[in-house]
Amino acid sequence: MGIRERKQKHKEDLKESILQAAKKLFLKEGFEATSIRKIAAEIEFSPTTIYLYYKDKTEIAHALHQEGFKVLAEQFKVLTHIEHPFERLKAMGRVYMQFALENRDFYELMFVMKEPIDYLGQECADHHWEEGAQAFHQLLSTVKACQEKGYFKKFESESFAMLVWSTMHGLCTLQLHGHLEKVVTNKQILLGVEDVMNHTFETFVQVLENL
Amino acid sequence: MGIRERKQKHKEDLKESILQAAKKLFLKEGFEATSIRKIAAEIEFSPTTIYLYYKDKTEIAHALHQEGFKVLAEQFKVLTHIEHPFERLKAMGRVYMQFALENRDFYELMFVMKEPIDYLGQECADHHWEEGAQAFHQLLSTVKACQEKGYFKKFESESFAMLVWSTMHGLCTLQLHGHLEKVVTNKQILLGVEDVMNHTFETFVQVLENL
DNA sequence: TTTGTAAATTAACACTGTTAAGTATATTTG
DNA sequence: CAAATATACTTAACAGTGTTAATTTACAAA
C-alpha cells in the first residue's frame, strides 16, 4: 500500500498517534517540556488540531498516566509467581521502587502530579481513581494474604496497606526529588546515593518482619 | 554611617519587600501562579527590577522555602516541652501532618518541588540542604532518645529516622495531592476525607508501639 | 455541480521567564 | 562648578506557553 493510504490510515486514529507523540516527547523531556506545539510538530499537524481530540493538556496528562499504569501492571506480573504472600509483598515493594527509579516521569504523572487526577473531577466528581484503586487493591489483597499466614495480625487490612503504600511512596518521592541524598549525615555518606533508599527499604522490611 | 551603608540598607529592604510580596502572592495562589510580573506589580516596580535582587525564579523559590522552614521550626517549638521521647516523636508526627495540611503550598515548596533544592546545586554542588538536614536532625535525635528508653532497639538510628520521615512524607503528599481519598474502598468511605490520613497515622503509631 | 459538513488551519489573546539596551538620577572626580 | 562615572531602574523585546474564535480546506451527499 502507498504512503498516501498509510498516511490516511494514520489520520484515522489520530487520537492514538497524538498520544504516542506525546509519550515519546514526554519520556525524553518530561511532562512540562512536552508542549502542545511540540506534540503537533511531532505528528506534523497544527497545534489546534490536538484540541479536536483532547479537551486540554490535563486530558493528555490523564491518558499518559494511564499508559504509565499499563507499564506498572506489566512489572507487577512477575509477582503472581511468588507463592508466599510476605515474599510477594517484599518483592512488590522492590518492583514499585524500581519502577519509580526507571520511570521517573511516569511515576510523577501517576502518583505526584495533580493534573491527571483533577481530570477525573471534571466530568464526574465521585468517579474514583480506577487505576490507582486497582493497584491499591493488589497491595491490599497481598496484605490480607499475609495476615492469613499470621503476619500483621494486630492491624486492620486497609489501614495497614495504606501505611505500606505511604511509606513506599514517601521513600520514592524523597529519592526522586533529591531530598534524600541532600540530608545524609556523615555516617551514611559512605553509602552511594541510591543506596540510602535501598538501605531505608531494608529497614522497612526489618520492621515488617518484627510485627 | 556613610550614605553607602544607607544605600546598602535600602537595597536589602527592597530585596526583603520583594520576598514579602512574593510570599503574599504565593500564600494566596501558590507558587506557579506567582509570576515575576505579579510580584513586580505588588511592589510597584518594573518586572526586571526583580532580577537585580534575585538571580532567577528558583532563587525566590529557595527564599520562600526558607521562610517555610521558619514556620515549621516555630510549630516544632512545642515539642521541646514534651519530656518523654516517644510521646515527643508521636507529637512530632502530628505537628508535621498539621503543618502540611495547613500550609500546603509551603509543604510543596519545602518537600516536593525540585526548584528550591536545585538552587543549592547551582553555586556549590556538595553544599547540602541545611534546612532539611536540621529538621531531619531533630527527628533523628528524638529517635535516638527513644532508643535510649528502649524503643526501636533493633534498628539503626539513621535508617529508622529516614523510614519515619518517608512514611510521614508519603502520607502527607498522598493526602495533599488527592490520591488518598480517591483510593478509599467501601469500608473506609464511611470515614471523612481527612480521616483516612489520620487513621493511617494512628496505624503507624500502633506499628511503632509494637517494635 | 452545488451544497453541507467535518477536519484542519491561521491568527490571535493573554500569559510566562528572561535578557539586552537605554534612561534618568545621584555620586565622584577633574 | 562642570564633566565623567556609577547606580538603579525601565522599556522593549525574545521565545516560548495553553487555549480559543474565526476561517479555510477537503470531501461526501444531493
Image (tube, coloured by chain):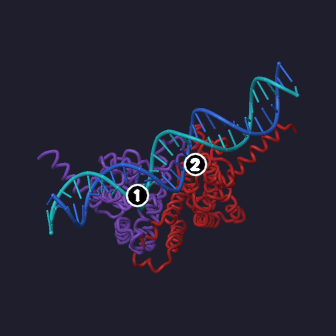
Chain colours: A purple, B red, C blue, D cyan
Question: What amino acid is at disc 2?
Answer: Pro
Q: Residue at x 54, y 65 (%)?
A: B208
Q: In this orientation, which residue lies closer to the viewer: A202 or B187?
A: B187
* Inter-mark Cα distance, 2 to 1: 26 Å
Quarter of the rendering containing residue B153: bottom right
Question: Which residue is under mark 1?
Answer: A57
Give coordinates of residue B2: x percent, y percent.
86, 37
Question: What amino acid is at disc 1?
Answer: Lys
Is residue D2 found left or right of B100 in the rendered image? Answer: right
- Marks counted in the figure total 2
Label 1 element class: helix
Which residue extends farthest left?
A1
Label 2 element class: helix
Q: In this orientation, which residue lies closer to the viewer: A42 or B145?
A: A42
Which chain letter matches label 1? Answer: A
Can residue B123 be seen here? The reply is yes
Give coordinates of residue A158: x percent, y percent.
42, 72
Give coordinates of residue B40: x percent, y percent.
65, 51
Give coordinates of residue B60: x percent, y percent.
62, 48
Can residue A87 be seen here? The reply is no
Q: In this orientation, which residue lies closer to the viewer: A131 or A127?
A: A127
Residue density around tag 1, few if under 14, some if 14–19, many if 20 or more, within 10 Å: some
Callout in the foreground (2, 1): 1
Which chain letter matches label 2? Answer: B
Question: Which residue is under mark 2?
Answer: B116
Quarter of the rendering containing residue A146: bottom left
